[in-house]
Image (tube, grey):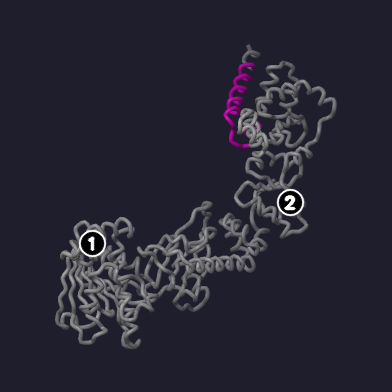
Amino acid sequence: MTLPDTTSSPLGADRAFQVDLRGLVDLLSHHLYSSPRVYLRELLQNAVDALTARQRLAPAGETAGLGIRLYADNTVVRVEDDGVGLTEADVHSFLATIGRSSKRAEGIAQQRADFIGQFGIGLLSCFLVADEIHVLSRSARTPDAPAVEWRGRGDGSYTVRTLPSSARSEPGTTVTLTPRADAAEWTRAQQVHALARHFGSLLRHPVTFDDGSGAPAVPVNPEPAPWARTYPTPGARSRALAAYGEEVFGFAPLDTIELDLPAVGLKGIACVLPETVPAGRRHGHRVHVKGMLLSEQAEEILPEWAFFVRCVVDAESLRPTASRESLYEDDTLAAVRDALAERLRAWIARAAASDPELLGRFLQAHHLAVKSLAVHDDEILRMLLPWLPFETTDGHTTLDEFARTHRTVLVTSSVEEFRQVAAIASAAGLGVVNGGYTYDRELVHRLPEIRPEATVADLDPETLTAHLDPVDRETELAAAAYLAQARDALAVFDCDVALRTFQPASAPALLIDSREARHERTRSQLAREQQGGVWGDILGALRQEAPRAQLILNQLNPLVRTAVTIDEPELARTSAEALYGQAAMLSRRPLRPAESSLINRSFLDLLAHALRKDS
């Protein structure tokens, strides 16, 4: 933190920015960091980077046993490392200037990929929990360098002094914080230990914690990452990875997928969720960079369609954002995302080829995710389309099974259209698939790519009505008067009325009215209302012959056979309205206000007629 230059200077001369440290800390706490707890992560990052820098200065044998030691006893928090340390000049350059980093100095800039954080900004985060930071350091670069002490205060002031080498006998750095009272939540001994485990469980340098009770210090990261360990058998490895996934995410994975991308130094696992995930819901993934936890909610590491897994990975070459709580979107991250997607595809392919039982359990839970992938991935389409479940007139079944029974596969464009026709189409022997769900219609139309002998077509009203049997001429003539009254009553809905026979006989009527037809009639109605205006000309040019809805009455139904004999005009109209309303409700589509009103009115009219008759 550079102190302002208060000396006078001539007009136009350069001046130094004045930095309000308290304001800057407030900015960090509210806009850069998600929580004050990150102070410990930043101290650990600085310690790890210092150790990395020292390892580059000395042969491997001379740095064996170096590590990081944490101490917290509810009154102070201390982080000590055996790293490269700082000289007095380093302290003035890197602790007194916001944004400067010791990783830029003395030829280390070209090796910056080996470091996690930035010393100056990282240390500044400690002001989130303390009003004073004490740093005691001794440099490993200069063997006879004295120890140097730096004290920084929240008001923006600091002091530096050199101390005898006896003040710190070995190279390294110790950072001590005296927490503020309002920061006790993050600086109690138990919390510091938990945060150290949370952020540093996969660090490659040994980290220990001492709570000041006199008990021996305990290791924070006693074992390497589970994928970096050796196991006696492949089965033991699989069980260990699954156990780690359950420990991290809180669920027993359906399976674990090992992830290994040597080009970016990425290793980890993807845990397959055992239960269905709501469509479009994305889980965050746990991402470590060089062993340090970066984020538990890194959605960007996998493509959107991969919401059936949660990942925990450790990478060398991914770039953190300024807050080091998420990943920077760059070409490297895009390449990693694509490569991990390939690993997931390969796992699906292996399950399809060698483990049908696992594949079945996976598809039962995650068929929507696989459908979204199959739409854009021809290989997955060829492998899994025959296995994917669809809603059909034969129940929930696979397309492979359905196509064996129905050479021509009809597909609806909406869920409501399927609900309208399912029972009648099934009774007529038609094979219809519900294409109203996400991806389903597009995938069904690609069935001939897998089964060339299959034919797929969109279901239209003419196809269905062609499979309904006409009534004989005498019956048609006898019902003519009633049908005329019914058509007149339902003209307001642009609905025609016809008499047919179809199964099941329990269904009195079938309403065939597609969403597209309703939209076209609405547009035509608007064009009529806008006659003579500019919009009328535009809509008139677009106008087509508006398709009418069809109410098909079932002559096999006893209620319909009675209704068509009604010779009282008002009662005939009311019964036709009631049949239309019942068919509209059975279609399960949203009712228009006029239809809701009609249903209520026809019910009350029929009730009033029945009461008059009884009296």
Marks 2 and 1: which is nearer the front? 1
- Left/right placement of residue 29 relative to residue 356 reads left
Above or below for 141 versus 218: below
Where disc 2 sits, the SS reads: strand
Residue identified by numbered label 1: 19
Where disc 1 sits, the SS reads: loop
Residue at horizontal 68%, vertical 45%? 412
Q: Amino acid at mark 2?
A: Val
Q: Amino acid at mark 1?
A: Val
Segment tinted magenta in the rendering: 582-609
- The one nearer the camera, 339 or 248, is 339
Quadrant in which the N terminus appears: bottom left
Above or below for 7 versus 460: below
Residue 455, horizontal then vertical, whole percent: 76, 53
How far apart are the alpha carbons under marks 2 and 1? 70 Å
Q: Quadrant of residue 196?
A: bottom left
Residue 294, horizontal then vertical, whole percent: 38, 66
Q: Earlier in the sequence, mark 2 or mark 1?
A: 1
Quadrant in which the C terminus appears: top right
* Few, some or many residues within 10 Å of mark 1 (<14, 14–19, 20+): some
Our reading of the magenta stretch's main secondary structure is helix
Label ID, residue 456: 2
- The one nearer the camera, 395 or 20, is 20
Farthest residue to the front: give it: 11
